[in-house]
Structure formats: C-alpha cells, structure tokens
Image (spheres, rainbow, N blue to C red):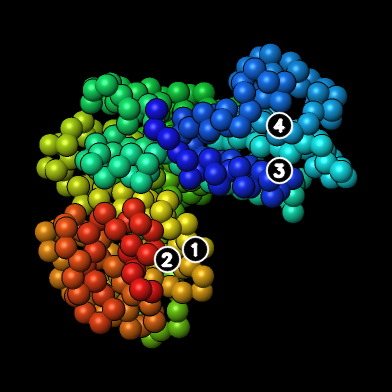
Amino acid sequence: MIKRDSLIKEVRSSVRRSRAVALIGPRQCGKTTLARTLVRIDSPNYFDLEDPASLSRLDEPMTALKDLKGIVVIDEVQRRPDLFPVLRVLTDRVPMPARFLILGSASPELLRQSSESLAGRIETVAMSGLSIVEVGLSKLSKHRLRGGFPPSFLARTEIDSFAWRKNFIQTFLERDLPQLGVGTPAPALLRFWMMLAHYHGQMWNAAEPARSLGISEPTVRRYLDILSGVFMVRQIQPWHVNLKKRQVKAPKIYLRDTGLLHYLLGIRTERDLLGHPKNGASWEGYVIEEIIKATSPDDIYYWATHSGAEIDLLLVKQGRMYGVECKRVDAPKLTPSMRNAKDELGLDRIAVIYPGNTRYTLGDGIFAVPFDAVTKGLKGLFPGR
C-alpha cells in the first residue's frame, strides 16, 4: 500500500471547511481507499452505491441521512443523481450535524445535478492515479510504463499489469459508462479511444476521425467529451493573445494515464516503448500530467501559431504565467519557438523538462530542467520565482 498523506490531508481540510465535498476522479484511482481512512466501511455513515444493501438503505434518502452526525460518505454518487436535491436540503441546516463527502467517477459537468443542486455549498477535490511524488523517483520507468492506477502499478508482473488494463477498459466501456447514461455501443467507443491514442499530444481535428469511423463530426465531439468527462482524456485549450500571427485554436489531446495509452498502442514493455514512434508523445503527456498534479495550477493552456511557434504547456498560478516544454533528449537546446513564446507571451520563465540530471541556462529566462524537479512543484521547476 502506497501512502497518500498529502491527499488525505487536503480532503480532511476540505471536509472541515465545507458543508459538502466532492472527491472526483477516474474509477479505480483510490477514492474509496482514501474515504475509508475517514469513515469505516461498516459505519452507518458509509454508503457504497455499488452495494445493494446501501442502495436499499437509501430507498428513502431523507429518512436515511437526516439523523446522521459527523462525516457521511456516499461512494459512486453518479449512480444516484436524484440524491443531490436531498443533499441540498441537508447541507442548508443550521446548525449542521453532518458534513458530506461524496465520491464520483464523473466530472461535475457530466453530473449537472451536483453543480446545479449544490452550487455554493460544495467544494471539489480532484483525484488521479498515483503520482511520481507518491511512488518515488526510483520507480519512474515503471510508473510511466504502467500508469498511475494502483492495481496496474502494483501488479506483480508486466503481464499482470497489462491484463488489468485490458480488463479495466472492457469493464469501463461495457458497465461503467452505461451506468452514467451513455448509450454509445462499447465497440464504437473502443475504436474511437484507440484512435485517440494515436492523436495523443496532437492538435484535435474532428474531421479525420469522423471520416475514419464513418460517423458525423458532432458525434465524434460527443465521444471526446464523454471520455474527457470521465477523466480518461485531457483536452488542453489554446491560449490566445492579440498578435499579428495566426494562432492555432484547436485543443490538444492527451490520454491522462500513460498506462492506458500504452495498452491501446500495444506497448507491453519498456523496450517496446523506447522503440515506439509515440515514445516522445508519451513522455510529453506523462510530464504534463505530473506537473499538473505537483503544481495544482489555476489554469493550463498550450500555445501554437500556424507558422510553427509552439509551447507545450502554459501554467497560470497566482497571476503569473510560466511555460513548459517537454523534450525526451539528452541535452535540450534553445529554439526560436521558445524564444518567441517567452517574448510574445510575456512568460515569467520557461522550463524545458528532460530526462537528465543537470539544470542549465538555455537563454534569458529559459532553462533546461531535469525531470526530478517536477516532484518539488513550482519551486523546483522555477526556483527563485
């Protein structure tokens, strides 16, 4: 078992501060394990909506919940969206005897009931799979290959890890999405998901996938929004500024977990990965996800122009904007694209993350930064900022 002390501390603080807290993240990322550190599973305050007994207890939700005190956990809340109006009433009580921790595997945008019924009453804590900070830098290669889902990362062998990811995707498409009301056939979504794996790290254009799959562009966009809403895909939107240059306006697409990306690409071992054409894109997506986990930015974007200038990631934090480039090379060099981004966007600094050991200066405010700096957050990436 890998301890996730900082995440537990964050959730505890949120529960003390807010009437209701939504702990959201993909299936199997560890939400239930974390919640059980706060409320025992055999407690009357714990409701697992995949357990028939818990569902039966909530046949009359107001009766079941109104007399409870302390922290009340409702796990897999997306299975009972009708609970949100009841929670609104319960969280408005003064004094308030209970605070609610609801666990969900879909974003608030996908579960509109939560954002509408509990507006102003609920705090959201986003959770993902295990981070490099949690598993340790010595496990970097294993973590990148297998991804952050605990059962995949902790599997006994590479074969076991690969098999778990195969079963996860099958169950996710055939059971979990239908429970969210997604009626799209599982084979169609699987084909689309596999196609997205080949778009990983690229700018999105719905026309080509639509032609390949024989479906309309609106349907393709709906598929993409579904997978984004259940934390499988990250869409990074472009940053626009008033420049004379024509800027790219399409989002960039990343599969959020490299383990699932590698499964969909047929990559089983580190040797397979190092020889695969998507090795560089895999590194880019992995670095971006780990930076987001480590820095908790206020906003993220990328920037690109039609003339070829580009920056992989723009981090907005406390009113300042930083640039990140991801290079899987032995010794990154300064490029005109980096210099243009630094000057034209007014970036505070640019960090070029690479799998080396030495930090060095590439240009004015532009630095080559070893990957291990990611584990130290913004202070590690941009010391003395």
**Measuring 35% from the left and 46% from the top, which residue is drawn there?**
133
**Measuring 26% from the left and 54% from the top, which residue is drawn there?**
372
For label 1, the SS is: strand
Residue 365 appears in the figure:
yes
For label 4, the SS is: strand
Instruction: Classify residue 158 as left or right of residue 18.
Output: left
Q: Verify CB contact (< 8 Å) between mark 3 and mark 4.
A: no
Disc 1 from disc 3: Cα separation: 24 Å
- The quadrant in which the N terminus is found is top left
Q: Which residue is mark 2?
A: 315
Q: Amino acid at mark 2?
A: Leu
Can you tell which mark lies on residue 20? 3
Earlier in the chain: of badge 3 and badge 4, it is 3
Kindly give the residue lying farthest to the right in the view shown: 94
Earlier in the chain: of badge 3 and badge 2, it is 3
Disc 2 from disc 4: Cα separation: 35 Å
Q: Verify CB contact (< 8 Å) between mark 3 and mark 2.
A: no
Q: Position of residue 282 (x, y in %)?
A: 26, 48
User: Around disc 3, counting alpha carbons within 10 Å, would you say few (fewer than 14), some (14 to 19), or many (20 or more)?
Assistant: many
Q: Position of residue 357 (x, y in %)?
A: 16, 58
Q: Which residue is mark 4?
A: 72
Can you tell which mark lies on residue 38? none
Foreground mark, 3 or 2? Answer: 3
Foreground mark, 4 or 1? Answer: 4
The image quarter in which residue 88 lies:
top right
Q: Amino acid at mark 3?
A: Ala
Front residue of 159 and 361: 361
Q: Amino acid at mark 1?
A: Asp
User: Around disc 2, counting alpha carbons within 10 Å, would you say few (fewer than 14), some (14 to 19), or many (20 or more)?
Assistant: many
**Measuring 29% from the left and 78% from the top, which residue is drawn there?**
365
